[in-house]
Amino acid sequence: MKSPVHRCRDVEHARGQGRASTGANYLQAEQRIPISKDVITSSSASAMWFIRDVCGIVCAMITWLLVLYADFVVLFVMLLPSKNLMYSIVNGTLFNVLAFLALSSHLRAMCTDPGAVPKGNATKEYIESLQLKPGQVVYKCPKCCSIKPDRAHHCSVCKRCIRKMDHHCPWVNNCVGENNQKYFVLFTMYIALISLHALLMVVFHFLYCFEDDWTKCSSFSPPATVILLILLCFEGLLFLIFTCVMFGTQVHSICNDETGIEQLKKEERRWAKKTKWMNMRAVFGHPFSLLWFSPFSTPDHGKAETYQYVV
């Protein structure tokens, strides 16, 4: 974290208040300005959001290709050659529904504005329009020249300040922030579920093929079948561990109302403490329903919610 001396360089004071007059008390809560969410909502919130980062685009494409590969092996190597029609229908339907939800969540997490602060709004005219009272200060980001609200951090990849930024994830080619954290959590959950499902089907398929002729349990040659299944098993195990850890970390952060960056920097809590259930509803929507698990439902983060400029 910046020292108070360094941070003062990016602080705008109300008229009639010199920089030296604020002293060490400029961090007091009563000096911050509660402001409506509409004022700091990004102008791109209603438009398509997409980060033009080569590394992120490649990682996102790899994610989709790996899911499509798993779907190919599940359908054409294990289920379609199976003699049990009901087994194939049930497992094929379940796997594809979960895969569809996972990719939909990934797309929403990637193409949703994570909570970007309007860029370049820290102008003298705009600050004067806020009508600051004597002693009040606002902090502006020197990198994107925006008025920086409380709990916002600058992302060097997105080149924007993001409200409640948790981290920048190359696998979704976007920051995980206030507006898209729900979709990222759903993405990790559904990927974990299809990974577990695929691993279980691989185990059952190996047991079935050991008891029967390998040429009858797959439309591919035995060596090709074994290689495809081993690759799927490795992919499923790797993604199961990774997404379970990410899912658990995200849920823990949501319940404690503390982002990953805030935990890493050990930032002092200056916001109101709420119950874990209230924090969950703030991310997934009010009230609890099956829409929590839908990537097509946009959560209501609270119209009456206010923010404070960090100083």
Image (tube, rainbow, N blue to C red):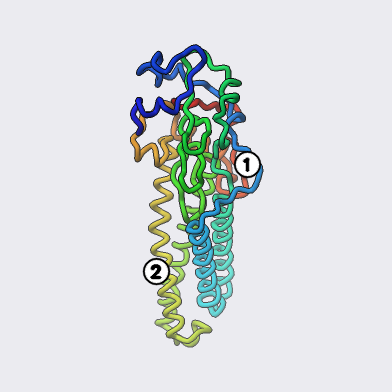
Amino acid type shown at disc 2: Phe
For label 1, the SS is loop
In the picture shown, does residue 155 fall above or below 74? above
Q: Can residue 287 be seen in this view?
A: no
Amino acid type shown at disc 1: Ser
Give the residue drawn at x 51%, y 53%: 173
Number of the label disc, if any, that sits on residue 131: none
Q: Can residue 13 be seen in this view?
A: yes
The image shows residue 189 at horizontal and vertical percentages of: 48, 53
- The image quadrant that residue 287 belongs to is top right
Give the residue drawn at x 44%, y 85%: 222
The residue singled out by tag 1 in the image is 44
Report the front residue among 86 and 62. Answer: 62
Report the front residue among 191 and 289. Answer: 191
Give the residue drawn at x 46%, y 81%: 225
Give the residue drawn at x 50%, y 82%: 218
The image shows residue 199 at horizontal and vertical percentages of: 43, 67
The residue singled out by tag 2 in the image is 234
Q: Residues within 10 Å of mark 1 (few under 14, many from 20)?
A: some
Quadrant of the rendering where the N terminus is positioned = top left
Report the front residue among 163 and 20. Answer: 20
Q: Which of marks 2 and 1 is nearer the N terminus?
A: 1
Report the front residue among 262 and 199. Answer: 262
- The image quadrant that residue 232 belongs to is bottom left
Q: How many marks?
A: 2
